[in-house]
Amino acid sequence: MFTQLIFIIILLLLTSFTRTNDDYLQWAAGLGAYVLLLGLIAYQNYAYKKSSSHRKEALNFLTSVELTAFIALSCIFIGVPKTFYFPSSSLVVYNFFLYFFGLFFFHYTYPKKFPAASSAANQIIILVPFILPLLVYTFINDLLLLAGYNLEAQSFVVIALFGFTFALVLLMLMPPVLLLFWRCKPLNDIAFVQPFQSVCAKANFRHGGFKVWTVLNHIPTAAIIGLISKFRYVMFTRTLLNRLSIEPLKAVLAHEIGHSKRRHLFKLPFVLLGMGVTATLILSFFEEGTVVFFNHLAKVFPFHYWREMEIVFLFVLTAITAALYIRYVFGYFSRLFEKEADLYGIEIGLPASSMIDALEGIAVATGNSHETPSWHHDSIANRIRFIQKAEANPLLIGEHKRRARRSLIIYGVCLLSGILFLTAPYYPEIQLFKTLNALGLSIEKGLTSMISSLFP
C-alpha cells in the first residue's frame, strides 16, 4: 500500500500539468488507447499466470507504472474535456477513475489461486480515501472560483495558511470517513477487549474504540488513525487476531499506541509537507532553463509537440523528485518511527519477547518474509534485532528517541529554509528575503546558463 501511495502522489502532481481540450474526437481516441492498455494488462496477467506471489507484486508495480505513464501522456498531449463549474475537481475524478479502474482490472483479471488477490474491489477501496483530501480541496477551490475568488492568484502565505488550516481540519475529521470506506466493525470480543484495555490503562491511552479492519482481512496487520481521543481508533484485521496469541497482540496494540504517544500521526504529514516544498523549489530552479532548452531544440528541429515535451520533462522532473523524496526522506522517518513504536511496549512494562513473537508471527503469516526489505518499515529481521539490542541495553531506547528528535530538528530547519526561499519573492523589502531571493535567482540563472552552454 505504501508503494502505491507514491503513484497516487505523482498523479496528484499531474493535475498542475494537465491541459483541457474541447476536441472530443481526440479525447475518444485517448480512451481507445486506454482500452488497449487494459488489454495489455490482461495479457501480462495471462502470461505470468503460473508465477509466484512475488511476481504478482512486480506485475502490480508494472501496472501502476503503465497506468501512470499513460494518464500523464494523455493529459499532457491530448488533454481532458473542460467542465465550466468544476474544472479542477472533475479533472481529479477523471484521472483517478482511469487509474483505479486500471488497478481494479489488474486484480480482477489476475489468476485467483493467490489468497492475497482476494477481492479486486477491496484493493481499490483501501486506496480511495487517500485522494479524498485533494478532491475536497479542489471542490472548495472550484466553489471559490464560481464565487469570483481565485485562491491560486493569492500570495504564497495566503495559500499556505489555507492549506495548513485545511490539512489540520482534515486530520481531525478523516478517521470516521476512513472507518466507513474501510468497512471497520467494532471489536466486541471480550477475550480481546479486556487484555487490550489493560494495555491502554498502562499507557494512559484514550481512544474511540477497537475495530476490525475488514477491507484488509486477508493481511495480518494493524493500524491506528485519529489525533483526537474521541475519534482515535485502533484497527486489527481478523487474520492478525486469529494468527497471534493474546500476548503478541498486546504488543501490537502497544506498538500502535506508541505511534500515537510519539505523535507520529502528526509528524509523518509534517514530513510529507517537505515533498511539496522540495518539488516546487526544484521546479522553480529548472523551469527557465527548461524553456531555453526546448526553445533551442525547436529552432534546430522543427516539431509540433515541443511545448508538450517541455511539460512532460517538467512533470517527469517533479515526479522523480517526489518519488525520491517519498522513498528516501519519508521512508527514513517512517522506518525511524516504526522502530520507536516497536520499543514502546518495553517502556510500559511489556516483555520484549511479546513484540518479537508478534513480528515472527507476521513474518510467518506473510510467507516467511523475515528478510524481505521494506523501504517504509524496514525488514522484520532488522526490527527484531533492534528490539533484542534494546532489551540487552535499555539505554538504546533513549538514544533512539534522541536520534528521532535530532532528525526532525534537522528536517525542520531544511523545511523552514525551503519555505523562506519560496516566500522570498513576496517580501523584497525585507533584507533576509531579498538576500534569499537573490540567491534563488542566482541558482536559477546558473542552471539556465549551464543548459544554454550545451548549444553552440
Image (spheres, helix red, strand yellow):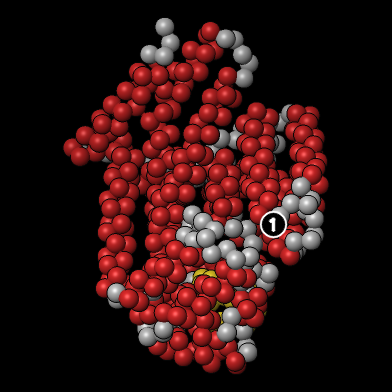
Question: Mark 1 = which residue?
Answer: 53
Residue 135 spot, x, y in % from top left: 59, 53
Residue at x 46% of width, y 18% of height: 293
In front of the other: 293 or 63: 63
Q: Is residue 125 visible?
A: yes
Left or right of 24? Residue 318 is left
Q: Residue at (57%, 68%) from the top-left corner?
A: 363
Residue 284 vertical position relative to residue 419 in the rendered view, above or below: above
Q: Residue at x 47, y 75 (%)?
A: 356
Residue 205 x/y as whole percent: 42, 83
Q: Nearer the viewer, residue 110 or 119?
A: 110
Left/right placement of residue 367 relative to residue 42 reads: left
Number of marks in picture: 1
- Residue 272 vertical placement versus 29 (above, below): below
Corner quadrant of residue 446: top left
Task: Kindly indicate the quadrant of the structure image that contains residue 117.
Answer: bottom right
Residue 85 in view of the camera: no
Compare residues 168 and 197 and report the one nearer the observer. Answer: 197
Along the horizontal axis of the image, is 448 left or right of 436?
right
Q: Does residue 444 sit above or below 401 in this rendering?
A: above
The quadrant in which the C terminus is found is top left
Dot 1: within a 10 Å radius of its alpha carbon, few (fewer than 14), some, or many (20 or more) residues? some
Where residue 182 sits in the image (x, y, percent)? 65, 68
Name of the residue lying farthest toward the left: 431
Amino acid of disc 1 = Ser
Figure quadrant of residue 190 = bottom right
Q: Nearer the viewer, residue 46 or 204?
A: 46
Q: Quadrant of the N terminus?
A: bottom right
Residue at point 40% right, 19% down?
451
